[in-house]
Image (tube, rainbow, N blue to C red):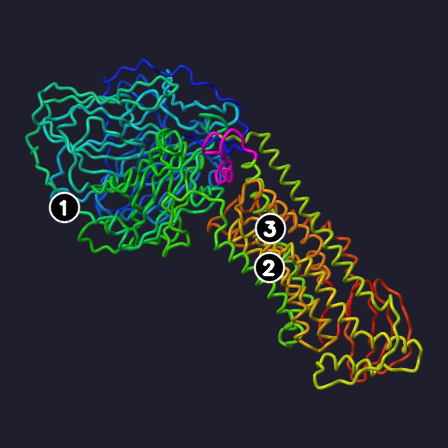
């Protein structure tokens, strides 16, 4: 069952309609051309070779009547062939190969290039030539020599790769792995066989027979003129050139259409490989009873196996058969044909090749060998999994459709998140040195041949059916079909993230001894090449230790319940925010911490906090709201929000079409604006309170009281300010009024601190709610937002604690009022908990996320950005802090460059700038609120008065210590003075 979808298409390049396949050659004469055995490059002694990758003419038939251009490999200055020459190496003997890209432009199959998937290192096509990179499939190599899709080279460029060959004897393949073009490059002919030989072992187990025939089967589309074509079986004609699978109309073996081969009356070793892009073969082998299966992907099987009459082999799987034709009669023929299980729109000739038994082949030096009952002994992977403490992982393979049977891309999901190598760079991890248990789910219509680079596995439909007789690097993941739930685990694999030699009994190789650096990521992917190229490919990382992913056996269904861990963590983070408010007492009472109250520190804190809030709002909460609105609006069946996160829809019959998706965005916007509207009255109350108390001197003229004498409990800050005020006494009436007001500032600041505390408590309540809701989206999101809130809670606490402490000299009083204000935050989180305690439906999650996103953006725009600008009008620290806030762990999901993350970062920065511009007026008005320090020792001179923006110059005094003139200002419009003990400004 496919995953249905209705919205964004990944492969949506503005491509013209491709011409339909016409004039395909269909009247092929079978078994009229002799099998061509590729040349063998013997590198068993080590050394270096230069290999070219080029375009050449190729004969599909022996007589050359049907020929056309292909891509191929060859030694430098030789003619490229399809397949390329067989490279034979010796186990443990390293070689080096320099690969030269000599492919001309345009691509041989340029009509089928889909530029929307030829991205990253392949994006320069066609301007830089045809990209290519060579991967030796199944070889253990450092990432830099592995031929990863993100390491492609262009025309006239070269790469030197070193192959250590430090593993068991086996048959490998080398093929192209260019990002976005593997499907076309391989189809055009870029593949060959790579053999690791262990002469001693092969002699010991009697498999070193004289006749060794490589058989690479691959279906292709060829027209009447011999030109190679590619499938256009595409339900999105005119939209994309990508097709879900490309199937050929005729089979080739070693590049020749339906050949024959003469077989001696002797034992023959057959190395059968599937070089098709998508087709899996169900081979009818009429001679199966005369053969034993001796090897699969990663080397010899433990015990030789009987060969079934119908041998199934998927793309890039390999099997080796040892067949004894010594008792056959001369002239006997065997036809190998495919019994297809996949229906295609193109007429398919299922014949593959013919064996002709001939006594004319000299067998004088050929002897019949007896196979031992055991070829190799391997360690028990299940037992290693238990002994080494390997993890359980659940992997989901799916497709995204725009309608039934019209897929737009393939996908891999792990831990509820889509992953691929180019746009969403999360990774599949495996702990190096351990064996892990992977559970695969496949609700699609297709089985998927899954391939890991650099590791091997043993798999089965259930734990009791795991094939322990062989090691595999390509494993078929069956689809659930109609008889099982779409979430059923269809394949269990014990994945050995160790060198394959470690898995051989008696080996001295350590579990982590790859003998090369494995710190860089590799890839794992479906080996249906059209799937691989359109997102069913993930980065695959060998980690030095277990990651933090929970064990998952694929049987735990998704739930809408809120876990205890989430509740405790979210409440705990809101309590930390409250504590940060209260700890502000230390800033105004501990001399070494007073630097936290200077304008630079406050600007940095406010800017970081604003940036984090805007980032969380848009990068996480907004998209989550859209996802859950889509799930809530899904009709006709159940919804799957995890699939919606990847652009897909329900695993069942529910659909969310374009109208549904549009409504989800509109609903998100509406709830977002509601969230902003909720904050505006709160901000109004806060500012009215602060401004009223801040302009106290301008609004009231109270009676003069005596200045109290300092007591033993009076703080140094209070004593200093009183001493300064005493020194200001003069005989003028104006000074008397000033001193009368000054004597009343104790009560003024006490009340101001209390009112500010109440106002900020109202402000903290929705922040607590926002923190709890954000934590539901993921602990990482909650932690990041918590840090942002703590950053600005500290200066907010200073705004409460400073006036109370200044008035009373009591740290306890200051702490009490900051605590009263701070506790509002966990209360807000508690309300959020109560709202979702019964579980969270999609209809509740969606508006909750959107409303909170609006709250965060409004707080940032109305409160934090103006505050940051007020403390740093020149922007010396504001801009850099705002930028730094965007580099949260949310943007660092991979070690490699990520264009999607950069796009998201740019979007958040743009949103931040818009919010900043929107708050410019309030910030500008506050910019003139300049704080000044009262001098300690001064004599009065003549008084004069000058009115200015938000301040009034009351008097100029001469400092008796410095002899310089210094000013005293009266501040207005809510801007409070800065004494020698603290900064105080509205937050």
Q: Quadrant of residue 66?
A: top left
Q: What is the magenta range? A: 633-653
Q: Is residue 757 left or right of residue 113?
A: right
| 3D distance between C-alphas at marks 1 and 3 | 62 Å
Q: Which mark is residue 615?
A: 3
Task: For the residues labelled 3 and 2, say whether their Cβ atoms are less than 8 Å apart.
Answer: no
Q: Position of residue 302 (x, y in %)?
A: 17, 42
Q: Which mark is residue 826?
A: 2
Tell me the crowding category of disc 2: few under 14, some 14 to 19, or many 20 or more residues within 10 angstroms, Cα based: many
Mark 1 vs 3, N-terminal side: 1
Q: Secondary structure at mark 2?
A: helix
- Looking at the rendered image, the disc whose residue lies closer to the viewer, 2 or 1, is 2
Q: Which quadrant: the C terminus?
A: bottom right
Q: Which mark is residue 200?
A: 1
Tell me the crowding category of disc 3: few under 14, some 14 to 19, or many 20 or more residues within 10 angstroms, Cα based: many
Q: Position of residue 395 (x, y in %)?
A: 39, 42
Closer-to-camera residue (981/142): 981
Q: Position of residue 508 (x, y in %)?
A: 20, 56
| 3D distance between C-alphas at marks 3 and 2 | 22 Å
Is 716 situated above or below 549?
below
Closer-to-camera residue (46/755): 755
Please check the rendered image and state whether residue 281 is part of the magenta-colored stretch, yes or no. Answer: no
Q: Secondary structure at mark 3?
A: helix
């Amino acid at each position: 069952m496919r995953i249905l979808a209705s919205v964004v298409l990944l492969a949506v390049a503005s491509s013209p309609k491709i011409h339909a396949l016409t004039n395909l050659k269909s009247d092929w004469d079978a078994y009229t051309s002799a099998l061509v055995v590729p040349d063998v490059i013997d590198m068993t002694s080590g050394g270096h070779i230069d290999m070219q990758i080029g375009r050449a003419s190729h004969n599909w038939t022996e007589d050359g009547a049907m020929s056309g251009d292909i891509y191929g490999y060859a030694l430098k200055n030789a003619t490229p062939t399809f397949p390329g020459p067989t490279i034979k190496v010796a186990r443990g003997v390293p070689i080096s190969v320099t690969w030269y890209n000599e492919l001309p432009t345009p691509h041989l199959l340029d009509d089928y290039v889909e530029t929307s998937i030829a991205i990253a290192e392949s994006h320069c096509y066609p301007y830089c030539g045809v990209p290519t990179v060579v991967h030796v499939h199944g070889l253990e190599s450092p990432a830099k020599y592995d031929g990863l899709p993100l390491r492609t080279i262009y025309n006239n460029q070269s790469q030197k790769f070193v192959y250590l060959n430090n593993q068991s004897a086996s048959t490998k393949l080398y093929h192209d792995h260019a990002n976005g073009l593997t499907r076309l490059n391989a189809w055009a002919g870029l593949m060959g066989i790579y053999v690791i030989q262990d002469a001693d072992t092969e002699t010991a187990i009697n498999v070193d027979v004289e006749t060794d025939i490589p058989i690479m089967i691959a279906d292709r589309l060829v027209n009447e003129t011999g030109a190679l074509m590619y499938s256009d079986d595409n339900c999105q004609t005119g939209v994309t050139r990508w097709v879900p699978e490309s199937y050929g109309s005729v089979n080739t073996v070693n590049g020749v259409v339906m050949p024959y081969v003469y077989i001696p009356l002797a034992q023959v070793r057959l190395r059968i490989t599937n070089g098709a892009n998508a087709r899996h073969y169900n081979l009818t082998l009429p001679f199966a009873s005369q053969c034993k299966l001796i090897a699969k992907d990663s080397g010899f099987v433990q015990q030789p196996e009987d060969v079934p009459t119908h041998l199934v082999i998927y793309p890039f799987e390999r099997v080796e058969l040892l067949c004894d034709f010594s008792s056959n009669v001369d002239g006997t023929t065997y036809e190998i044909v495919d019994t297809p299980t996949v229906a295609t729109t193109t007429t398919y000739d299922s014949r593959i090749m013919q064996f002709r038994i001939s006594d004319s082949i000299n067998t004088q030096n050929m002897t019949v060998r007896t196979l031992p009952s055991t070829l190799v002994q391997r360690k028990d992977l299940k037992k290693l999994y238990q002994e080494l403490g390997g993890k359980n992982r659940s992997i989901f393979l799916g497709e995204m459709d725009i309608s039934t049977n019209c897929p737009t891309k393939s996908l891999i999901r792990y831990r509820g998140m889509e992953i691929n190598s180019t746009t969403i760079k999360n990774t599949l991890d495996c702990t190096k040195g351990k064996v892990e248990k992977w559970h695969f789910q496949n609700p699609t219509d297709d089985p998927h041949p899954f391939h890991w680079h650099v590791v091997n596995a043993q798999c089965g439909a259930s734990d009791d059916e795991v094939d322990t007789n062989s090691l595999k690097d390509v494993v078929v993941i069956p689809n659930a079909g109609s008889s099982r739930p779409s979430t059923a685990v269809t394949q269990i694999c014990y994945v050995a993230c160790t060198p394959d030699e470690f898995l051989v009994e008696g080996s001295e190789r350590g579990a982590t001894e790859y003998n090369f650096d494995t710190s860089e990521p590799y890839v794992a992917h479906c080996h249906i090449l059209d799937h691989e190229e359109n997102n069913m490919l993930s980065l695959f990382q060998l980690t030095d230790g277990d990651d933090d992913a929970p064990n998952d056996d694929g049987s735990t269904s998704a739930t809408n319940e809120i876990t205890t861990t989430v509740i405790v963590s979210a409440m705990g983070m809101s309590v930390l925010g409250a504590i940060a408010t209260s700890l502000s007492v230390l800033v105004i009472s501990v001399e070494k911490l007073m630097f936290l109250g200077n304008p630079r520190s406050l600007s940095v804190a406010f800017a970081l906090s604003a940036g984090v809030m805007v980032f969380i709002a848009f990068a996480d909460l907004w998209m989550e709201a859209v996802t859950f609105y889509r799930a809530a609006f899904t009709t006709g069946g159940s919804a799957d929000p995890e699939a919606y996160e990847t652009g897909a829809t329900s695993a069942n019959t529910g659909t969310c079409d374009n109208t549904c998706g549009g409504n989800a965005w509109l609903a998100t916007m509406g709830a977002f604006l509601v969230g902003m509207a909720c904050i505006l009255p709160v901000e109004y109350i806060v500012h009215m309170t602060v401004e009223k108390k801040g302009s106290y001197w301008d609004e009231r003229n109270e009676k003069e009281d005596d200045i109290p004498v300092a007591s033993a409990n009076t703080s140094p800050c209070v004593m200093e300010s009183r001493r300064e005020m005493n020194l200001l006494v003069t005989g003028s009436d104006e000074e008397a009024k000033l001193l009368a007001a000054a004597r009343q500032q104790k009560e003024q600041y006490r009340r101001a601190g209390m009112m500010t505390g109440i106002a900020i408590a109202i402000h903290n309540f929705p922040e607590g709610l926002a923190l709890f809701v954000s934590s539901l989206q993921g602990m990482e999101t909650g932690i990041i937002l918590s840090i942002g809130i703590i950053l600005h809670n500290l200066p907010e606490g200073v705004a409460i604690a400073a006036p109370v402490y200044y008035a009373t000299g009591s740290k306890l009083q200051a702490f009490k009022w900051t605590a009263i204000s701070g506790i509002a935050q966990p209360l807000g989180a508690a309300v959020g908990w109560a709202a979702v305690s019964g579980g969270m439906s999609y209809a509740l999650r969606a508006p909750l996320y959107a409303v909170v996103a609006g709250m965060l953006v409004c707080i940032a725009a109305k409160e934090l950005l103006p505050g940051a600008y007020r403390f740093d009008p020149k922007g010396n620290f504001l801009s850099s802090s705002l930028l730094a806030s965007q580099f949260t762990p949310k943007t660092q999901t991979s070690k490699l460059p990520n264009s999607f993350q950069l796009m998201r970062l740019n979007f958040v920065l743009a949103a931040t700038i818009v919010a900043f511009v929107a708050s410019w007026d309030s910030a500008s008005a506050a910019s003139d609120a300049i704080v000044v320090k009262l001098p300690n020792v001064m004599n009065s001179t003549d008084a004069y008065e000058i009115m200015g923006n938000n301040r009034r110059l009351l008097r100029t005094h001469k400092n008796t210590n410095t002899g310089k003139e210094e000013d005293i200002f009266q501040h207005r419009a809510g801007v409070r003075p800065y004494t020698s003990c603290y900064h105080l400004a509205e937050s």
